Amino acid sequence: MASEIRSMKVRGAGRIARAGAAAMGKFAENYRGRSLEDFRKDLGTAADILLESRPTAVSLRNGVQTCVKDVCGASSLDEAKNSVVQNARLFAESSSKAAEFIAKIGARQVCSGDVLLTHCNSAAALGVIKEANAQGKNIRVYATESRPWRQGLLTVRELSEAGVDVTLIVDSAVRSVMKKTDRVFVGADTVVSNGDLVNKIGTSQLALAADEAGVPFNVCAETYKFSPMTVFGDTVAIEERDCGEIADKELLPEGVKVYNPVFDTTPAKYIDAIITELGIISPGSVYDVMMRQIGDGIFGMRDRL
Ligand code: RUB
């Protein structure tokens, strides 16, 4: 699973969190070792291998942490294995439910006849758009190409299959079409404690253009994409990928360097709303939600502090 995530066969923050949690569940289910101590060690190694596959997405970390959170307190190997299997199943259920809630809540923000703009390929943002369309709101959507992986092609396919009137644009057309846009909906790879958003490279440019044009900029994010450790000073590592994703080395003059960061940070001040399964919150409320998560001990926070 780690190599499928690294190679982008499985991608998108929500999908990789669910895939990571499912992999942990399978690992526990198929474990043939005989001691609890070995299981803890081997499970830790499996978790580390998964977590290194996409460093920016805190969702993967939270999905994996949720699975292993009861292993420390288990008194037998069977109890430990069962807790991982059970927690993986619960994560799959609750993350699917969260996506459904976000779609319903976000669709209420869309008015009939709205022109929307989205970036990359976010299941959470597309859930909102598809729900608004299913409610007969007669929307039109601009979708960015999202170089270099061109996830925008997945987005236009998915939206057109759902019957949405969708137009593909190159990333550099964002400022141009913003004048014709009523609302922006993007997803989140990671939400930071001060309300900043880390998402696909170019998201911050959408936010700037939206701010300039007075267009509401909405982030669709399940709360397992919130990074509670940023409260305690952790920074979000921005993943850099191979230069070959941008241009073939043979096409470039010798000595030319290529830089390929795949995520960027959108400051909280450009974000109008974060649509979560708990409801619509402002970036300034992210800290409070995170403190509740820490208090509840979810995502294994107590063990990590
Ligand atoms: C995908 C991306 C998406 C978020 C949220 O980047 O930036 O906006 O992951 O997606 P990549 P979702 O294609 O590099 O994984 O809402 O599906 O969780």
Image: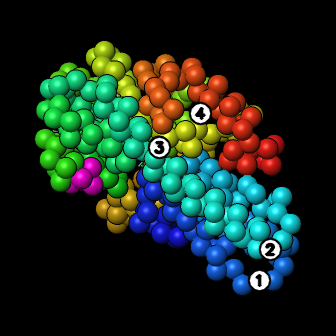
* Dot 4 amino acid type: Val
Say above or below: 57 vs 243: above
Indicate which disc residue 33 carries: 1
**Residue 209 visible in the picture:** no
Mark count: 4
Query: Which of the two marks, 3 or 4, is nearer to us in this view?
Result: 3
Across and down, in percent, residue 131 comes to: 27, 40
Query: Which of the two marks, 1 or 2, is nearer to us in this view?
Result: 2
Mark 4–mark 2 CB contact (< 8 Å):
no
The answer to which of marks 1 and 2 sits earlier in the sequence is 1
Q: For label 2, count other residues whose C-alpha is less than 10 Å away and answer few (under 14), some (14-19) or many (20+).
A: many
The answer to which of marks 2 and 3 sits earlier in the sequence is 2
What is the distance, in whole Å, between disc 3 and disc 1 at their CAs? 35 Å
- What segment is highlighted magenta in the picture? 153-158
Task: Identify which residue is drawn at 71% across, 59% down.
Answer: 68
Indicate which disc residue 98 carries: 3
Q: For label 1, count other residues whose C-alpha is less than 10 Å away and answer few (under 14), some (14-19) or many (20+).
A: few
* Dot 3 amino acid type: Ala
Residue pointed to by mark 4: 192
What element does badge 2 sit on?
Answer: helix
Q: For label 3, count other residues whose C-alpha is less than 10 Å away and answer few (under 14), some (14-19) or many (20+).
A: some
Mark 1–mark 2 CB contact (< 8 Å):
yes
What is the distance, in whole Å, between disc 3 and disc 4 at their CAs? 19 Å
* Dot 1 amino acid type: Gly
Mark 2–mark 3 CB contact (< 8 Å):
no
What is the distance, in whole Å, between disc 4 and disc 2 at their CAs? 36 Å
